[in-house]
Amino acid sequence: MIVRYHWFVMPLLGLVGLLPTHGAEPALPELAVIRQVGAKGAGNVAAAQAALKLQQADPKHLLDVLAAIDGANPLAQNWLRSAAEAMAQRQLQATGKLPIESLEKFLTDTKNSPRGRRLAYELIARVDGGAEQRLIPGFLNDPSVELRRDAVALALADAEKLLKADPAAAKTKYQLAYESARDQDQVKVASDKFKELGEKVNLPAHYGYLMKWQLIAPFDNIDDKGWDVAYPPEMELDFAKKYEGKNQTVQWGPYETKDDLGIVDLNAVLDKYKGAIAYATTDFISDKDQTVDLRLTSMTAFKVWVNGKLLLKSRAYHSATGKDIDQFVCRVELEKGKNVILLKICQNEQTEAWAQDWTFSARICDEVGTPIFSQDRTLEKTAAR
Amino acid sequence: MKSLISAALSLCVATTATAADWPQFRGPDQQSIANDSQPPLKFGKEENVAWKAPLPGRGVSSPIVVGGRAIVTATSWPKQDRLYVLAFDEKSGKELWRREFWATGRWFTHPTGANAAPSPASDGKRIFAFFSSNDLACLDLDGNLLWYRGLSYDYPSAANDIGMSSSPVVIDGAVIVQLENMGDSFAAGLNDETGEDLWRIDRKAFSCWTSPTLFRANNRNLVLLQSTDRLSAHDPQNGKKIWEYEAECAGIPSSTSADGKIYLPSKGLTKLDVNASANAPVVAWEVTQLGPGNATPIVQGDKVYTVARAGVLSCAAIDSGEVLWKQRMPGTFWATPVIAGKHLFAANQDGQVHVVALGDKPELVSTNDLGEGILGSPAVAGNALYLRSDAHLWKIAAP
C-alpha cells in the first residue's frame, strides 16, 4: 500500500519531482518544457520562454495545451492554464472566435482530465452565452467536481422553481441534486430541502464517514512531547490488553458516532484531557485492490497510518475554523480484504476557549468524493443515501 | 553582479515603481501615505465613483496601482481554491486581463478572511501575486506568467487553516515572504527574475499574520520580520540576521518605520531607535494605550496614528509617545487606513469609509457607505482612492 501522488503527502515520502507524466505525449515541444517545471522554482525560466512561444502558436493548438494538463504536476497545470488563457485571449482579440466545436468535443470526453475539461468549458462560455443551459445539465455525475457543482446548482435552482407548483417534481429534483452533490454546502442545501419534503437522508453514508472506532486514551502529551513517542498502539493492536497511560491504566473500548459528519468528539467520549493523546482504529474491508481517498478532519495534531504505514500527519493545533470537512486528503492503495486504519489524535494544553476542541472525522471515498464502503458496513435504507 | 547593482540602486529607491503608483500593501515604502493626493472627501455608491468593476471572487487583499493598471487578487469557489489575478485600466476600469490558477496549497480560511488575503506587490515591471495557499505567481504587466512558486507544494505543512495573510515586499531584487505558522514556519527571499530561493530561514512555529517590512537606516535596506516573540532585522539579499529585539509582539499588525525609527506593535506601541554604532534597537518609549488592533501604525510628520479594532483612532507625538487625541470611528476595523494629504481614510468591515481630518484636533469629516464589506487596505494613486470590497473594485475620484 503506497500513497500515490497527492500533493500533501508527497514530501512525506520523498516523491517530489517524481510525478508521473502519463498524459498524452505533448504535441508541441514547448508543452514538454512547461511540464518540466518542478518544486522550488525549477524550470520556471524555460517555462516562461515556452509560454511566450505558445502564445504565437496556431490556435488549433489550444486543445493540445488543454490535453497537456492531464498528468502534469500542479505547478505545470497552472502554467498550462495560464498559457491557454493567453492563447485564447490573443485569438479572441484577433478574431472574436474560439474553436468551439473542438473545445466542446474535448469537454464531453471524460477521458480528458477534469481540469482540462473545466477550462475548455470556461473558454466556451466566454463566447457562447447559451453554454451553461446547453451543456451544464449533462454534468450531474461528472468526474470533474467543478462541472458537477455547476450542474447541481442548476438542479437546485430548478427544484426551487418547482417547489410551490409541483412539490413532487421538486422532490425528485432535490433528490437528484442531493445524490449528485459532493460539496458540503450543496449537500446541506439539498438534504435540508429533501428532509423538509418528508424524506430521510443518511448523511454519513452520503459522505462515506467511518463511524465505528476502537478508542484508547489518554497517553502523555505534555509540552507536545508525545508527538514523537511511539506508544503501544503504534506497536500492536490488542484490544484485550491494558497499558500504562497518562497517570492511569488505559484500555481500548468501542465507540460508534451518530454524528451526521462522522465527528468523534473525544472530549465528550473520553474526557477533557489536556496534554494528551488518543488513538483510534478501525478496519476497512475492501472488496478489491483499489486506490481511494482517505479524508480526515482534525482540529489538532495527528498522524494516520494505514496497514502500519504512516501516510499523513500534521502538527498544527487549533489552527482551523472547524467549519470545513476534508481538511487533509491522501490517496491510499487499499488491499483486497482487511485494511487497518490507525489515528493518533493529539491535544495540547492551550487554555483559550477556542482551543479546547479535540475532535476528528475520517471518510473513505473516490477522488470526486463519492463514498466507498467497507464490506462489513450495513446501510440504513433511505430514499436518498 | 546583479546583487551589487541592485544594492547600489536600492540605496535610492527600493522599487522602480513611479511616484504615481501604489505598488504594494501600504503603498510606496510601506508608509500608508500619499502626501500629495487629494481624493474626494465625500463619496458613496454613486457619488464620486469614477468606476466600479465586478470581481469574480472574494478577497481581503489590497489593490495595487502600477503602470496605469489597478491590480487586484481574488479567490472563488466554495473551497476558495480558484485564484485570480486581475488587471484593470486605471482610467476606464476596463478589465485588461485576468489570469486564473488552481491553488497548490491549503485554501482553508476563516469565513471573514479569504485565500486572497495577502496583497500583491510590484517592482514596477512585474506583479508578485501571493495567496493564503502560499501560491506565488509572478506576471508581467501584460499578464504573462514569468514564474510560479507553490510554497506549500515545496513545504507542505506551511499552512494555517484559519488563513495566512502576510503580504510580500520587494527589496533589492528579492521578493520576501513570511510564512509563520505551526508547521513549516519560515521566511524566504526569492529571486525576482526567476522565483528561485535566494535564502530561506526558519521562524518560530507559531501562527502569525504580520508582513515583512522595509527598514531603511544607516544607508542600507533591511527587512523587518515580526514574530509574536521578537522583531528581527535581516539583509534582504541573503537573509542574514543583523539584529533582534525580543519582546511579546502583536501577531496581526505589522511594524512601520520612518526616519530610521521603528514603531512596533508591542506592549501597546513601542518606538525603537536603532543605534547606528551598536546596530541594535533601543527602546525610546512604550505606550500601552497606543496598541493597534489589526491595522499597522502610520507615521506622518511628527505624529503616529494607530487604530484599535473597535475603531478608536489615536494620535501621538513620535518624540515622546504622548497621546495627543483620540477619535472614535464606528465599526470594526481590519484594514490599515491610508493618509492622503491631510486626511485619513479608514474602511471598516461593513464597508463604511470614515474620513478624518488630521491636525491638532481631529474632525470626522464624513462616513461614506459603499454597502459592501471592506477588509483590505485602500490604495491611493493620483487623486484617486482604490477600494476593494467583497464584490467590487472601486475607483473613487472626482469627475
Image: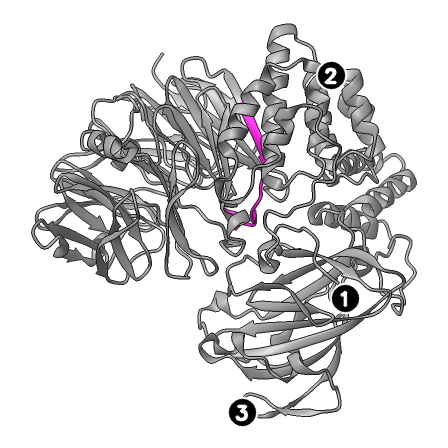
On the picture, is A17 further left or further right than A224?
right
Where in the figure is residue B265, as x and y percent of width and height? 26, 53
Where in the figure is residue A355, as x and y percent of width and height? 49, 67
Separation of disc 1 and disc 2 at Cα? 44 Å
Residue A216 placement: quadrant = bottom right
Separation of disc 2 and disc 3 at Cα? 68 Å
Which residue does the numbered mark 3 point to in the structure image?
Answer: A247
Separation of disc 1 and disc 3 at Cα? 30 Å
Which residue does the numbered mark 1 point to in the structure image?
Answer: A210
Q: Is residue B320 above or below residue B350?
A: below
Which mark sits nearer the N-terminus, 2 or 3?
Answer: 2
Query: Do marks 1 and 2 both belong to one polypeptide chain?
Result: yes
Specify the segment rendered in magenta. Answer: B98-112
Tally of numbered discs:
3
Where in the figure is residue A129, as x and y percent of width and height? 73, 17
Looking at the rendered structure, the kind of residue marked 1 is Leu
Chain where mark 1 sits? A
Which residue does the numbered mark 2 point to in the structure image?
Answer: A128
User: From this viewpoint, which residue is outermost toward the top?
Assistant: A95
Judge whether residue B104 is colored magenta.
yes
Q: Is residue B94 above or below residue B208?
A: above
Q: Secondary structure at mark 2?
A: loop
Examine the residues drawn in magenta and state their main secondary structure: loop
